[in-house]
Amino acid sequence: MTITTTTAARKQRLFDPKLLLGILVVAALLVVSLFTGVYDIFGNTDGGEMFAITRIPRTIALVLAGAAMAMCGLVMQLLTQNRFVEPTTTGTTEWAGLGMLTVMITFPTAGLNLRMIGAIAFAFVGTMIFFLFLRRVTLRFSLIVPIIGIMLGAVVSSISTFVALQTNMLQSLGVWFAGSFTSVLRGQYELLWIVAAVGVVVFLAADRFTVAGLGEDIATNVGVNYNRVIFLGTGLIAIATGVVTVVVGNLPFLGLIVPNLVSMVRGDDLRSNLSWVCLTGIAIVTVCDLFGRLVIMPFEVPVSVILGIFGSVVFIALLLRQRRRG
């Protein structure tokens, strides 16, 4: 009886009618995104072609990148038991950038696929280093964790900048990390579909991530291979971060603010929150991208700038909230 009640309650949370309203709101934002831009797609004869080449790929990229980075933040926060970590506060994004730079120097004619492999490999190594550090060092305050991650990311970023200076690739490095959907065109964004597969795997393994988030001892006692789950989670985070970094660039704070906002409203159940986290991530990225496109039209402000300002304000608010709670 108890199991039946629990299962029914879980299904109710998973298929919350409010989720349909959220999907409709996000769909409306995406429609606005499709028809926002400098080029007049209705007044020109090649408007339909331009719509297919630029607007549709850009909108699909907003969906996949926004959902992927928000989801990465949720998984990372669960595995580290810390609400202030995400790929840009643990150095994962910087490691991905260093990997992409290394590939470009080693293989100057490398295409997107090879750059993506380099970014994923370095992102995986960097994230594992961060996780190993957390397992070996006991930190008294949770706020120290993201500070260490940001410091690690700054060191990796400095190495990337030095290498780029020595190889005359500093401008390219700046463009990669700008975090913008301006250059997303048909034929250049399709790699992002990989993160959709990552999302499916995260959903299937959600319960294992939830158990691993309770700690190694509890996970082991209930029969979950803790190290294997950590390895799987790190791999999924590295794949999603590497792909998004190669195609779009840096999307700061997205993986930090979205899971926290959803958790404040709905609690900490990963499986039932996953769809809300993806939807909220898509909504925030789309709104920031629309603002960046409209604020100085016909020019554009990179979405990473808008996200950086918005995300830092929310980040500080979360820190103050944590401090008040002690």
Image: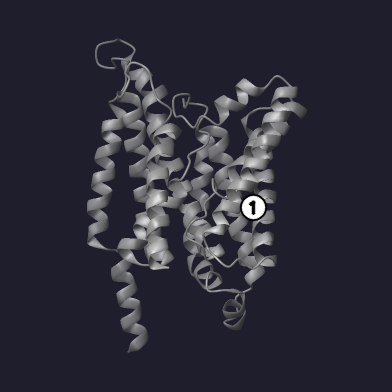
Q: Which residue is mark 1?
A: 127
Q: Residue at x 74, y 22 (%)?
A: 167
Residue 279: in sight, yes or no? yes
Label 1: few (<14), some or many (≥20) within 10 Å?
many
Relative vertical location of residue 117 with respect to residue 323 in this rendering, above or below? above
Q: Quadrant of the N terminus?
A: bottom left
Q: On the picture, is 122 further left or further right than 303?
A: right
Q: Position of residue 234 (x, y in %)?
A: 61, 56
Q: Quadrant of the C terminus?
A: bottom left
Q: Position of residue 6 (x, y in %)?
A: 34, 80
Q: Position of residue 262 (x, y in %)?
A: 35, 58
Q: Residue at x 53, y 39 (%)?
A: 244
Relative vertical location of residue 129 with respect to residue 8 in this rendering, above or below? above
Q: Amino acid at mark 1?
A: Thr
Q: On the picture, is 320 further left or further right than 110?
A: left
Residue at the bottom extreme? 1
Q: Residue at x 25, y 16 (%)?
A: 42
Asked which quadrant contains residue 157, the reply is top right
Residue at the right extreme? 106
Question: Which color mode does the image show?
Answer: one colour
